[in-house]
Amino acid sequence: MKRRSFLSMSVAAGASLWLPRAIGAEDAKAAQRRDASKAPVVPGRGYDNLLILIELKGGNDGLNTVIPFADPAYYTLRKNIGIKREQMIQLDERTALHPALQPLVPLWRSRQLAIVQGVGYAQPNLSHFRSIEIWDTASRSDQYLRDGWLTRAFAMRPVPFGFAADGVVIGSAEMGPLANGARAIALVNRTRFVRGSRVATPMPQLKTAFPGGAFGGSIKTAMQVLAASYTLKVTAAGRAPPEQPLSGKGVAVIRLTLNGFDTHQNQPGQQGALLQQLAEGIVAMQAALVELGRWHETLVMTYAEFGRSPRENESNGTDHGTVAPHFVTGGRVKGGLYGVPPMLARLDGNGNLPVGVDFRHIYATVLGPWWGLDASTILQQRFEPLPLLRA
């Protein structure tokens, strides 16, 4: 059975699978993958370590997520939408969390939640489309790359034969960091089809209770995909031989999308509801991963195209901005505050925050310490990993 065999995966509630490129065709990328697979393996690393990405689509407002409450400029800039001091969750003498993130407090207290502040990139682009392209490809703002950063990682070191796929995308039809070459699957709707063939095999049931709504459903599907990783079925492309069991870890990456963060107006209620979904979803995800015995080999990371403007607008919202904090959690995460806290007295000429940490430092942490890959080659520049992981 060739590695690029046709994949057949059943999904809770019957999501469909979309394979972004033909499977089984020999091409230049296949040759590159074979050549790259001859590189030495770093002991104790690799794709047994799972990465789960959560895209906060639209650009989350960082200042009301991780709040610099001790800076008097915060309330000067946000007279209407600033979070009241008595409502926020204090982390230290100057930093607090939005009250909707209360479910994450146990992770914070157990030192399994890291918050990287001031994340962005030089010469930021405030277009949704271009900025997320920069994050997805790990390019400079003046550089246009075709392949996603994860696609380049898998070209350097293919995932093991027994894995069902490089990655699974849930909640979006956009492949993002898996674009243009990764052997990835997108679960895009709620019909039971796999490339035109009906799928009837039920997914495993978990004891974990998942939140309702689209995002909670995406997390449930993701966890069921992992639970099914030892019983996934595979058939050869263009043929219909008897199905054979596929062993292994399932996938190396899962990407989830939480929509709605483009809060130009009436931000307080909208963002609060989204952050609550995020927090409850992460807690359910942790419970499911513990149930599956995968929590200590999973790294969960949020990302978004940009942050929001420090100053509120006239519609009780915020406009496109530059930097934002991002969350990293998992059983081997060294929790705490990292990066550069917001410096509201040092806004640039457009009234935006300066970049504190290039997002590619987080990617280098995934590629290097987490997976044991050559991050500099994949990112086309050297970025030091952040000290977010325990040995």
Image (tube, helix red, strand yellow):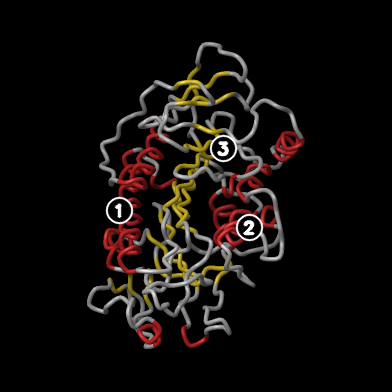
Helix, strand or loop for disc 1 = helix
Q: Residues within 10 Å of mark 1 (few under 14, many from 20)?
A: many
Where's residue 201, x and y in %?
A: 39, 21
Give the residue at x 61% y 70%. Answer: 124
Label 3 to label 2, Cα distance in Å? 18 Å
Label 2 to label 1, Cα distance in Å? 29 Å
Q: Give the answer, above or below, for where 50 lies relative to 244.
A: below
359 horizontally vs 97: left or right: right
Q: Which residue is mark 2?
A: 138
- Check whether the beta carbons of the residues at disc 2 and disc 1 lie within 8 A of each other: no
Where's residue 89, x and y in %?
A: 28, 71
Helix, strand or loop for disc 3 = strand
Where's residue 195, x and y in %?
A: 54, 26
- Check whether the beta carbons of the residues at disc 3 and disc 1 lie within 8 A of each other: no
Q: Give the answer, above or below, for where 163 lies relative to 328.
A: above
- Is the N terminus in the top left, top right, bottom left or bottom right quadrant? top right
Q: Which residue is mark 3?
A: 184
Give the residue at x 48% y 34%. Answer: 249
Q: Nearer the viewer, residue 43 or 210?
A: 210
Give the residue at x 77% y 36%. Answer: 28
User: Which amino acid type is shown beneath numbered disc 2?
Assistant: Ala
Mark 3 or mark 2, earlier in chain: 2
Q: Nearer the viewer, residue 113 or 212?
A: 212
User: Which amino acid type is shown beneath numbered disc 3?
Assistant: Ala
Mark 3 or mark 1, earlier in chain: 3
Where's residue 161, x and y in %?
A: 59, 29
Q: Residues within 10 Å of mark 2 (few under 14, many from 20)?
A: many
Q: Which residue is mark 1?
A: 280
